[in-house]
Image (cartoon, grey):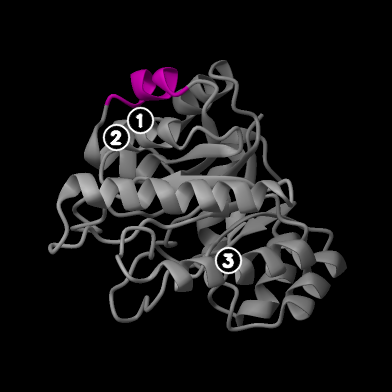
Amino acid sequence: MPRFAANLSMLFTEVPFLARFEAAARAGFSAVEFLFPYAYQAEDIGQELRRNGLQLALFNVNPGDYAGGERGLAVLPGREREFKETLEQALDYAGHLGCGKLHVMSGNTPASLPIDETTALWLANMRLAADRLAQQQITLLCEALNPRDAPGYFLHDQRLTDRLVSMIDRPNARVQLDLYHAQITHGDLSMLIRSLAGRIGHVQIASVPDRHEPVSREINYAHIFRELEKAGYRDWIGCEYHPESGTHVGLIWRKAFDEP
């Protein structure tokens, strides 16, 4: 049976962020994830996790100036020091919050740098990140984003992402498979999942094309969850979608998968 984690950056936004932990627990979730926790004290987030009996499945390393369009620092020349600082910040939060996975966003491909140099910079930064995360027994995750929603993002293709993650050559480096992005970019999700067997570190879901509840639109999630299980993935599945008509109303989809 799939195990779902509520993405608190997208779900339960009817209430303030720190109140979403209780809302998720009351809705039957045992785990949560979110994008960026850095506007809040780690101690306050940890208190909400403990008070509501929730596990933290995942969050993202600070990607730079997100509001200004930055989507990570790993491919940006001259930002190596800042990249290291964001890793330390995320590791501090992960230590306080008991989180074993961090998504390190790659960034938008710089026009000023040849692609081979960009790739070399990405690999150097990700190897550094993997080694540093390994010191705290944390998994490094790399995710492909679809070019419709994230034009110019360095990891724009799931197979490219898998190939580059293998080149990091670290046991704690894994692929983060967001099936919303993968469907838009590739389709043929069953074969994609089979090709990634044993290398998937985290999964996220939403409907396509509108990123709402994971109901029957382009993706048959009942089938996809069986494919994930056959591929050996039995960890948390992040519900990273925008509710179409309110969080609580939309959660009826979980009944098909024996969720509370």
Q: Main secondary structure of the magenta part?
A: helix
Q: Which residue is rendered at x = 22% and y = 58% of the image?
A: 109
Identity of the amino acid at label 1? Answer: Arg
Residue under label 1 = 163
116 above or below 10? above
Residue 101 in sight from this viewpoint: no
**In the image, what residue type sits under mark 2?**
Leu
Q: CA distance from mark 2 to mark 1?
A: 5 Å
Kindly state the secondary structure of the residue where label 2 is placed.
Answer: helix
Q: Which mark is residue 8?
A: 3
Spatial CA span between label 1 and label 3: 30 Å
Q: Residue at x 38, y 59 (%)?
A: 74
Specify the label residue 62 is tagged with. none
56 over 49 or under it: above or below: above
> What is the quadrant of residue 8 in the picture?
bottom right
Relative to 134, residue 78 above or below: below
Residue 251 on the magenta span: no
Cβ–Cβ below 8 Å for labels 2 and 1? yes
**Residue toward you, 191 or 155:** 155
Residue 233: x and y in percent read 59, 27
**Numbered tag placed on residue 160 in the rendering:** 2
The answer to whether residue 140 of the structure is visible from this angle is yes
* Label 3 element class: loop
Which is nearer the N-term, disc 3 or disc 2? 3
* Residue 254, picture quadrant: top right
Query: Which residue is depicted at the point 29% across and 54% down?
Result: 210
Q: Earlier in the sequence, mark 1 or mark 3?
A: 3
Q: Secondary structure at mark 1?
A: helix
- CA distance for labels 3 and 2: 29 Å
**Region rendered in magenta:** 188-196
- Which callout, 3 or 2, points to the residue nearer the camera? 2
